[in-house]
Amino acid sequence: MHSGHRCQQLHRLAAAPLALAAALACAAPAATEVPPPEAADQIWRLGAVAAPPHNPASAQKSELGKALFFDPRLSGNGTVSCASCHNPALGWSDGLKTGIGINGSVLQRATPTVVNMAFNTQFMWDGRMRSLEDQALGPMKTREEMHTDMDALLAMLRGSAGYRTLFAGAFPGEAIDEATLAKALAAFERTLVSSDSPFDRWLAGDRRAIDAAAWRGYQVFKDPQRGNCAACHSGPNFSDNGFHNIGVAQGGTAYDEGRFKVRPLASMKGAFKTPTLRDVELTAPYFHDGSAATLMDVVEHYDRGGDDKRNLSQDVRPLHLAPQDKQDLVAFMKALTGRMPALALPVLPLIDAAPPSAALPARTAAIKEN
Ligand code: HEC
Ligand code: HEC
């Protein structure tokens, strides 16, 4: 509605060489303005990342952590890196229903994104880890994920001139050990921040940053009488860092008790951590078991009030949303796709000896057995 006015201004301001650019900008149909944000909407504004006092951020730490994150030689047979599952080209996840680890092991749960983990206080679907530092060594020590021989790995890192330089820069005077390894990975992960999404730009006052569908979807999202999504997807990272049973159908295999295994309270049976919705468009399929293929499938799940009603959260109930509301919710979630700092892939340091491919025959053996 104001686009004509804006174009006139542009033409007036444009010096001759800029006139073409201005004309092109005005040729594209300018989005109409949606209502401005209200003061209460600012609860969604993403703040600055705070590193824990025992592991302050530094460029050297994140550079080292990045090398480690992308280095498959951290795994038992040199084939699996953190990035194998947390792949930057797939929203720092893997596009699979559940993760696939070393020697093709199929994991029980879906791989979450590692983006915006700096804003989390609970880690893993069941919150069994309390910090990124705590979490970092877990995948290496898990047989099905990376199956790392930690002593051999530390010897490999200490024996590499390139890694010694990176560690010395990141942790002057400290050893190359499990603690510095974990701190470097955590420091790198804290740099993976997605912000400046269309929704963030709207929060900052740009009324053309989101379209009418996304704006309407936001109203459905936050209204307790309609979507009720913000009951759990609350705060700047769209997660309350809490655990809820939303009634994901747990068919076939053994029942995943989720949070209950970590905190045996009846209410925690089948409860999982509320995941962030930032960049969610990029990380299909969805839910802890990857059972929802699309964002619309997720919305339909909530509209039905969940499937498995055992111990269902009171905040999940049939919503009876109109088809337009559902589409609007999806449009809103897509408006949460942000921008990330440019990522240059690391050049990995040389190591003295090739990683132990001797562990590889496990797969050949498995094939023979079949
Ligand atoms: C084989 C695939 C795989 C590999 C390799 C892997 N991860 Fe994960 N990651 C997962 C899965 C699956 C989960 C969720 C598991 C669960 O909740 O039980 C997860 C969870 C996480 C989380 C918690 C995310 C959240 O939302 O709470 C972080 C952080 C993480 N991984 C970092 C790493 C790092 C660092 C490495 C390398 C040292 C790594 N991962 C290697 C599959 C993988
Ligand atoms: C009672 C709390 C609660 C409410 C209400 C809720 N969610 Fe969730 N949401 C969760 C939890 C917990 C999960 C993970 C559950 C699982 O995987 O078992 C989740 C998962 C999701 C996912 C999948 C994300 C991923 O990375 O796999 C999306 C998308 C989502 N919710 C959107 C919504 C929308 C849209 C609404 C409103 C219609 C909504 N949620 C309402 C708690 C909630």
Image (cartoon, grey):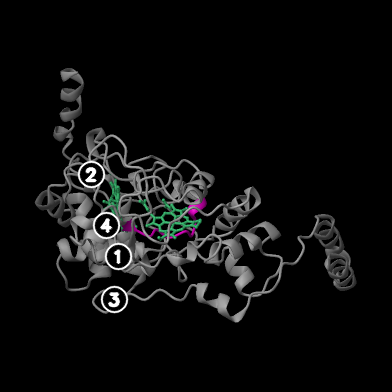
In the image, is 45 to the left or to the right of 369? right
The residue under label 4 is: 126
The residue under label 3 is: 52
Identify whether 154 is placed above or below 108: below
**Is label 1 in contact with label 4 (beta carbons under 8 Å)?**
no
User: Ligand 1 closer than 8 Å to the CB at disc 2?
Assistant: yes
Q: Nearer the viewer, mark 2 or mark 4?
A: 4
> Does the magenta stretch mainly form a helix, a strand or a loop?
loop
Q: Alpha-carbon neighbours of circle 4 within 10 Å: few (<14), some, or many (≥20)? A: many
Q: Nearer the viewer, mark 1 or mark 4?
A: 4
Query: Is disc 1 placed on a helix, strand or loop?
Result: loop
**Furthest residue toward left:** 151
Q: Earlier in the sequence, mark 2 or mark 4?
A: 4
* Residue 24 seen in the figure: yes
Magenta residues, as a range? 272-281
In space, the residues marked 3 and 4 are separated at their CA atoms by 22 Å
**Kind of residue at badge 4:** Asp
Between 30 and 122, which is closer to the camera in this rendering? Answer: 122
From the top left corner, tell me how far across and down residue 92 is, in percent: 41, 51
**Kind of residue at badge 3:** Pro
